[in-house]
Image (cartoon, rainbow, N blue to C red):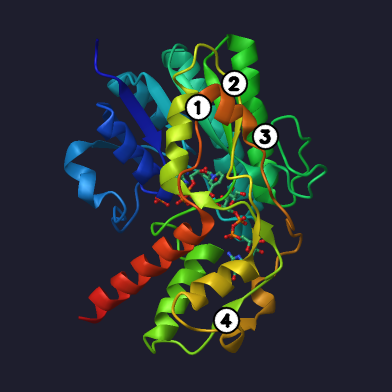
């Protein structure tokens, strides 16, 4: 059988790096799309850089996507690239829409033009449920996005469904709940906490400034979630799936555990800061991933305490190495 070839947009991001590792371990040839920047930002993929092919392209430029597909002819496309930070989507709503919403159409349309048989995965989000109208949230729960990012992801989801129905393309939307790891960007709350705790323990900081401690999320491990993305593209029929742990925890609980792991009490260090509050909040997310579990045979392998521990240990190690 010919070697499977996957193209990953967003390969320099958290999920892109785990997915690339996963696909390499399954014998895939991996093509990664990277956008031009003045400084190289391959930190998350430098350990596999000699095993993958990097090509320049941008979700804002459809011509670059068409060239990339024509030149490399992947069998699967994983569209992970996005302006993914919810908070930034308020000050940059148009850019967020261009990338996170219209970018999906550009990628889908490039696939349709070059080879509509390419299997397509879209990185959709539990942020689409926003001000939830149902608990827990599953594939048929109506969307009520609460940020320009959430609105953009709703567009990305429906354009994926529409290309599937209009052109009979194998296009799937994976509605993934929050997933974290030591490779998470420092601006997201879990990594901000794991990094902040380690810095406090090492005497580098005295406090950690956070926003809403009462928000609840269904947090899993990114390394577990990329397997679900792949499984979605290996089925007989394309479909959409919720991927979640089916547990919810508050930011406060994350703090309690992360500080507690280093024998610290979060109440002595966490300071509420209005700057990190959002104009409209998503208060509660908790998924129901029964469909992914039954149809894909997927399930998360990492528990919440294991995730908090993994991230805390990794940040402590990293900071100690930097101090040497
Ligand atoms: P991430 O770490 O922020 O990575 C985003 C990636 O997108 C980066 O590689 C970034 O490139 C790239 N990118 C941004 N704009 C681009 C553009 N115009 N053209 C090409 N590439 C561009 O995000 P992540 O956590 O890995 O998430 C991956 C995807 O899943 C995103 O679409 C996100 O919205 C979605 N999602 C994430 C979660 C989660 O909890 N992590 C949950 C649901 C859905 P640079 O490195 O050059 O910035
Ligand atoms: N980032 C951040 N920083 N969030 C904070 C802070 C803080 O200082 N303090 C409290 N929070 C709260 C936010 O208000 C939010 O309710 C929650 O922590 C999680 O915030 P993030 O970690 O920034 O993630 P997110 O849930 O908004 O979005 C992530 O998950 C989505 C899936 O539901 C991102 O990865 C999105 O790309 C993804 O789609």
Q: CA distance from mark 4 to mark 3?
A: 39 Å
Residue drawn at 30 percent across, 70 percent down = 318
Q: Earlier in the sequence, mark 4 or mark 3?
A: 3
Q: CA distance from mark 1 to mark 2?
A: 14 Å
The residue under label 1 is 297
The residue under label 2 is 239
**Left or right relative to 147: residue 74:** left
The residue under label 4 is 266
Q: Residue 176 location, x and y as percent?
A: 57, 40
Element at label 2: loop
Residue drawn at 29 percent across, 56 percent down = 43
Along the line of sight, which residue is nearer the eye, 136 or 128? 136
The residue under label 3 is 155
Give the crowd class for mark 3: few <14, some 14-19, many >=20 residues within 10 Å.
many
> Mark 2 against mark 4, which lies toward the viewer?
4
The correct choice, above or below, for 159 with respect to 307 in the image is: above
The correct choice, above or below, for 83 with respect to 271 in the image is: above
């Amino acid at each position: 059988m010919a070697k499977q070839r996957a193209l990953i947009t967003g390969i320099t991001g958290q999920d892109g790096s785990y997915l690339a590792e996963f696909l390499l371990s399954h014998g895939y040839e991996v093509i990664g799309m990277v956008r031009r920047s003045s400084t190289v930002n391959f930190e998350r993929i430098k350990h596999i850089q000699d095993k993958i092919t990097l090509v320049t392209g941008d979700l804002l430029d459809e011509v670059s996507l068409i060239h990339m597909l024509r030149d490399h002819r992947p069998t699967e496309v994983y569209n992970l690239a996005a302006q993914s930070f919810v908070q930034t989507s308020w000050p940059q709503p148009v850019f967020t829409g261009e990338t996170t919403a219209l970018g999906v159409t550009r990628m889908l349309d490039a696939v349709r033009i070059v080879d509509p048989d390419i299997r397509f995965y879209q990185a959709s989000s539990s942020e689409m449920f926003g001000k939830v109208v149902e608990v827990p949230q599953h594939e048929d729960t109506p969307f009520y996005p609460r940020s320009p990012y959430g609105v953009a992801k709703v567009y990305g989801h429906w354009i994926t469904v529409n290309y599937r129905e209009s052109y009979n393309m194998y296009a799937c939307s994976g509605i993934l709940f929050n997933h974290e790891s030591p490779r998470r960007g420092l601006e997201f709350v879990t990594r901000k906490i794991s990094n902040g705790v380690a810095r406090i323990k090492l005497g580098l900081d005295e406090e950690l400034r956070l926003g809403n401690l009462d928000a609840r999320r269904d947090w899993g491990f990114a390394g577990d979630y990329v397997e679900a993305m792949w499984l979605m593209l290996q089925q007989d029929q394309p479909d959409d799936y919720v991927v979640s742990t089916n547990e919810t925890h508050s930011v406060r609980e994350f703090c309690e555990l992360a500080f507690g792991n280093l024998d610290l009490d979060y109440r002595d260090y966490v300071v509420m800061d209005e700057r990190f509050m959002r104009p409209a909040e998503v208060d509660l997310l908790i998924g129901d991933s029964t469909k992914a579990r039954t149809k894909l045979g997927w399930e998360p392998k990492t528990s919440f305490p294991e995730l908090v521990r993994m991230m805390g240990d990794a940040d402590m190690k990293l900071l100690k190495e930097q101090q040497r």
